[in-house]
Amino acid sequence: MFYKFARAIIRPIIYLLFRPKIEGLENFPMDGKIILYSNHISALDPVLIGCVIPRQIFFMAKMELFRNPILAAIIRGLGAFPVKRGTADLSAIKHSLKVLKEGKVFGIFPEGTRSKTGTLQAFSHGIASIAHKSKANIIPVAIIGNYKPFKPITVRIGKPINFSEYFEKRSNTEMLEKMADKMGQALNSLLNYR
């Protein structure tokens, strides 16, 4: 309820200020479990993506955002949950798998932090592990541009990545590296598509 209310207020403001140009929305399934992953250029990224995608997204967010009780209450109300960066946070992984088991959309920025240069950074294996365990649809989303008021920013939604060849196998470090690399390549091609 709070998510719909907040989105109804924030969405017109985001569209007025940043005029998002949306490409590939037809690639985003309107039901079923989905891992949405994106490059990370600004603290506004989850807000922008949440305004563009018609389904609620449950984002993994850095633990530091939950230290302020008021901010924590707001972002929890929007569906975000904390992760301790730089560790294999089992609680965050379990929560993301629960979101996916319930057929919802789990959102993550697999670079782990914002990119100051806009260049895509290496992905952690965590996203590949969650993808392998959940067998969810995996959708890359590229944010192209910057958040200058009244200058359009592009949100490009890719086609689901087919990992069926990996889903049937036991996971190991090499496989997770290959999956993370494939995800990085898919996002990179969206970022560089002209």
Image: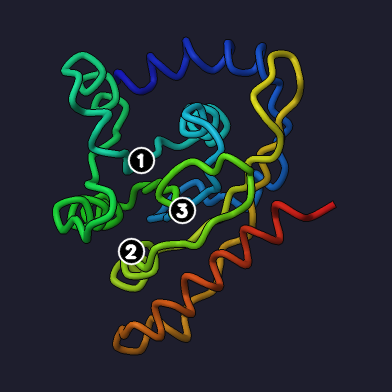
Q: CA distance from mark 1 to mark 2?
A: 14 Å
Q: Position of residue 125 (x, y in %)?
A: 37, 68
- Amino acid of disc 1: Phe
Residue 74 drawn above or below residue 123: above
In terms of secondary structure, where does tag 3 sit?
loop
Image coordinates for residue 16, horizontal then vertical, percent: 67, 12
Report whether 93 appears left or right of 138. Answer: left
**At 54% from the left edge and 43% from the top edge, which residue is drawn?**
115
What's the residue type where badge 3 is placed? Glu
Nearer to the camera, 71 or 102: 71
Q: 121 or 44: nearer the eye?
A: 121
Q: Residues within 10 Å of mark 3 (few under 14, many from 20)?
A: some
Is residue 182 shown left or right of residue 125?
right
Badge 1 marks a residue whose secondary structure is strand
- Label 3 sits on residue: 111
Residue carrying label 1: 59
Task: Judge depth for marks 3 and 2 and give the one in front.
Answer: 3
Q: Are marks 1 and 2 in contact (CB under 8 Å)?
A: no
Q: Residue furthest right?
A: 194
**Outermost residue to the bottom:** 169
- Tag 3 near tag 2, CB within 8 Å: no
- Which residue does the numbered mark 2 point to in the structure image? 126
Residue at horizontal 40 percent and vertical 50 percent from the top: 112
Q: Earlier in the sequence, mark 1 or mark 2?
A: 1
Given this view, does label 1 or label 2 mark the residue nearer the observer?
2
- Residue 189, percent from left and from top: 71, 61
- Does label 3 or label 1 sit earlier along the sequence? 1
